[in-house]
Amino acid sequence: MTCGAMNEREICPVERHPLTPFLPAGCRLLMLGSFPPERRRWSMEFYYPNFNNDMWRIMGLLFYGDRDRFVVRGERRFDRDAVEAFCAERGLGLYDTASEVRRLAGNASDKFLEVVSPTDVGSLLRSVPECRAVAVTGDKAAETFAAAVGCGRPAVGGAVEFPFEGRALRLYRMPSSSRAYPLALERKAAVYGEMFRTEGMLP
């Protein structure tokens, strides 16, 4: 279902981001997606909440050798407490590149996501002074972030450096953890693993 073929901007409601940034003390890597899916798709009140999204399976596989590390046994949901504790321990910050959007179709596809208000990424980066890398997870997030900081967009799996107020940071472009992105979970995990190893977060 779409909001309206002719006047999407007038018909589609503006959605504000439902979560606050997760910025643990000592944050080393800031991971930014585009925007959360519709709430009806959430399995927990945290980032990457759709049970069909593989972000937390990627993390489980990489850091614990267990893709189901963050899955609640016998249920179709992720363990929010375990996910938050993991992110805090590893210094992994989370938010999105848009703070307000319109969905031009009734799904979470970036193709039909109109960014109304980009996130103030400068404010985010000032909040995490130890952070030296940003990872964007998908094309829309890469486009929005690159426009905000004035840097180029790396190829999927690649990185570029950009300056921010005296800091030299790296921008990684990761493959989307959505199952709509045509790459096996293990291959996605391998790409994420290279980034975490480069940043000293994974042996």
Image: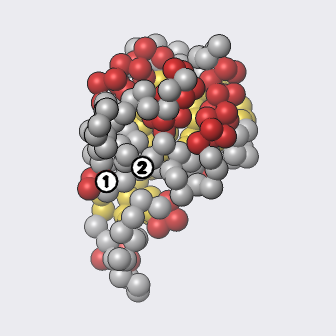
Q: Quadrant of residue 114?
A: bottom left
Residue at left offset 54%, top offset 28% = 61
Q: Which quadrant would the C terminus be assigned to in this image? A: top right
Instruction: Measuring from the top left, give residue 105's x and y in whole percent.
Output: 40, 71
Position of 191 with respect to 122 (left or right) is: right
Tell whether 147 sits left or right of 110.
right
Q: Nearer the viewer, mark 2 or mark 1?
A: 2
Which residue position holds label 2?
52
Tell me which residue sits at (31%, 53%) in the image.
Answer: 41
Q: Residue at x 37, y 47 (%)?
A: 50
Point out the residue furthest to the front here: 74
Q: CA distance from mark 2 to mark 1?
A: 9 Å
Quarter assignment of residue 175: top right
Viewer-closest of 82 and 158: 82
Which residue corresponds to the image point at 41% horizontal and 86% vertical from the top-left? Answer: 6
Residue 165 appears in the figure: no
User: Residue at label 1?
Assistant: 41
Three-letter amino acid code of the residue under disc 1? Arg
- Please say if the residues under marks 2 and 1 sit with CB atoms less than 8 Å apart: yes
Element assignment for label 1: helix
Instruction: Please state if 136 lies on the left or on the right of 160 as rendered.
Output: left
- Precedes in sequence: disc 2 or disc 1: 1
Q: Position of residue 95 (x, y in %)?
A: 42, 37
> Based on the displayed image, in which of its 4 quarters is residue 22 positioned?
top left
Amino acid of disc 2 = Asn
Which of 149 and 89 lies nearest the eye of the viewer?
89
Classify mark 2: residues with Cα within 10 Å, few (<14), some (14-19) or many (20+): some
Q: Position of residue 200 (x, y in %)?
A: 64, 15
**Element under disc 2:** loop
In which quadrant of the rendered image does the N terminus lie?
bottom left
Q: Is residue 188 above or below residue 179?
A: above
In the displayed structure, does residue 24 sit left or right of residue 156?
left
